[in-house]
Amino acid sequence: MADLFELNREGLARTEQRVVSAARPFHIDLGSIAYQAKKKLQVLDDAVDVALARAIKKTTRWLAYHSAKELKTALRLKNTKRLKDRIKIFTNRNAGQTSIWFGLAPIEIEAAGSPRQNSLGTRVAGRQYDGAFYTSIYGNTPFVYIRAARNAQEGHTTYRRNSKGNNPNSIRDEELKGRFPVQRLGLDIEEPATYILESFERRTNSRFQTLFDQELNFELSKRGVST
């Protein structure tokens, strides 16, 4: 014979009483409780996903802005335009990841300031480039150039806008044709940019944590979940 149990204030205990015909069975339905718990967890998961994506996006923009600003100061540039052109942000929503790409190739020397021709060459923002000259060769915009043979001695950093370069035969000025081949001067940013980006590692982690906490609290408050 099966044992009989009853549920009372003291809990579940064995009893010798028999169930009479007028008695009703006692049912415990946990389905609704489980559903509400699952629903609350789903709300939390959704809030975390939204907060995480938004915090990553904001952190990436913060890193791009402040790293460009510090590099501008280190290189003594006029503004951050050329540096911002080098920063690309890629987001993989399926993987929940965001990557920032910082191009470290030399930038054009003119980004540092207005070139000034002198007897030795060209000076830009306090930097002297012996053997260089500031003139218009391709089109109407002047840039700082140097003859390739002379730069083999000087060793100035060069700037290349694309791999194809320009055709010296398109130059109409006969005097300029005698200076070919020429190289356009650039400003090396790899070493200072690498140093600055590495210095941002700890600050970036701290900034992300702050932004994530803010975004998560905001999302939970929207959903009526207390923190």
Image (cartoon, rainbow, N blue to C red):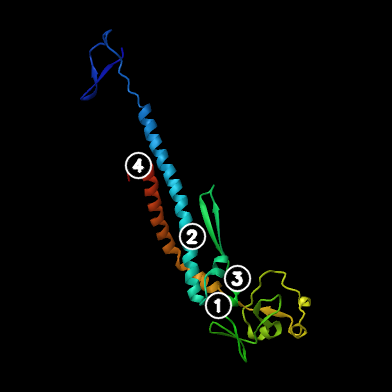
Question: What is the C-alpha distance between the residues marked 4 and 1?
Answer: 52 Å
Residue at label 3? 105
Q: Please provide percent x and percent y for residue 127.
A: 55, 84
- Mark 3 residue type: Ala
Any part of residue 7 in sight: yes
Residue 61 disc label: 2
In the foreground, 199 or 59: 59
Residue at label 4? 225
- Mark 1 residue type: Ala
Which quadrant of the view contains residue 8?
top left
Dot 2 lies on which element?
helix
| Foreground tag (3 vs 1) | 1
Question: What is the C-alpha distance between the residues marked 3 and 2?
Answer: 21 Å
Q: Please provide percent x and percent y for residue 216.
A: 39, 49
CB-based contact (under 8 Å), mark 2 and mark 1: no
Quarter of the image for the N terminus: give it.
Answer: top left
Circle 4 packing at 10 Å, graded few (<14), some (14-19), many (20+), is some
- Mark 2 residue type: Arg
Q: Residue furthest front?
A: 140
CB-based contact (under 8 Å), mark 4 and mark 1: no
Dot 3 lies on which element?
loop
Q: Please provide percent x and percent y for residue 201.
A: 45, 64
In the foreground, 21 or 109: 109
Residue 112 disc label: 1
Q: Is residue 117 left or right of residue 56?
A: right
| Foreground tag (4 vs 3) | 4
